[in-house]
Amino acid sequence: MSDEPKFEQADAQCEAGRAASEPERTPLQGFVHHQLKAVEAALKALGSLIPPDFRKYSREACEEYLKSFKVLIEGARTSVEREIKRVRGEKSNGDQPTRPSTTGRTKVKVEVN
């Protein structure tokens, strides 16, 4: 048995195991790596505090929110396409007037005072 404290022995074993499995990193890369691991662990800890039903319904709410924007964008796209066709002089099925034309064979005299 050596005279080194146990925590130093464990640290040396950990360093030896890490050196065999991981490529060499600069101190900055090591810092970023451990920061990312810390964030992942913190997110897991926070996730364990949230009830499963809350996560389920939050996910459904997000999906509905995205679907609402999809419908809005599709409607805008349809309106823009219809307007482009109108400007170009093309006719589409949705452009037919819903009421009779105001001009025709019959002429009506209107008095303007």
Image (tube, rainbow, N blue to C red):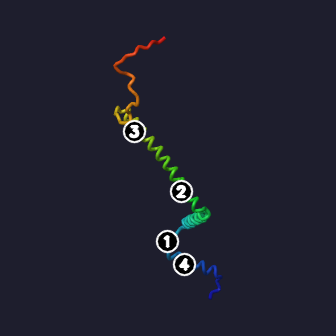
**CB atoms of marks 2 and 1 within 8 Å:** no
Is 13 on the left or on the right of 5, as rendered?
left
C-alpha span from label 4 to label 1: 12 Å
* Residue at the image position 41 percent from the left and 40 percent from the top: 78
The quarter holding residue 43 reads bottom right
Tag 4 residue: 16
Tag 2 residue: 59
Q: Nearer the viewer, mark 2 or mark 1?
A: 2
Task: Look at label 2 and name its amino acid.
Answer: Arg
C-alpha span from label 3 to label 1: 55 Å
Q: Is residue 6 above or below residue 24?
A: below
C-alpha span from label 2 to label 4: 43 Å
Residue with the most extreme top position: 113
Q: Is residue 49 above or below residue 109?
A: below
Q: Residues within 10 Å of mark 4 (few under 14, many from 20)?
A: few
Q: Nearer the viewer, mark 2 or mark 3?
A: 2
Q: Position of residue 61 (x, y in %)?
A: 54, 53
Front in this rendered view, residue 78 or 22? 78
Tag 1 residue: 23
- Please tell me which of labels 4 and 1 falls first in the chain: 4
- Please tell me which of labels 3 and 4 falls first in the chain: 4
Label 1: element kind = loop
Q: Residues within 10 Å of mark 3 (few under 14, many from 20)?
A: few
Task: Look at label 4 and name its amino acid.
Answer: Ala
* Residue at the image position 55 percent from the left and 59 percent from the top: 56
Q: Position of residue 3 (x, y in %)?
A: 65, 86
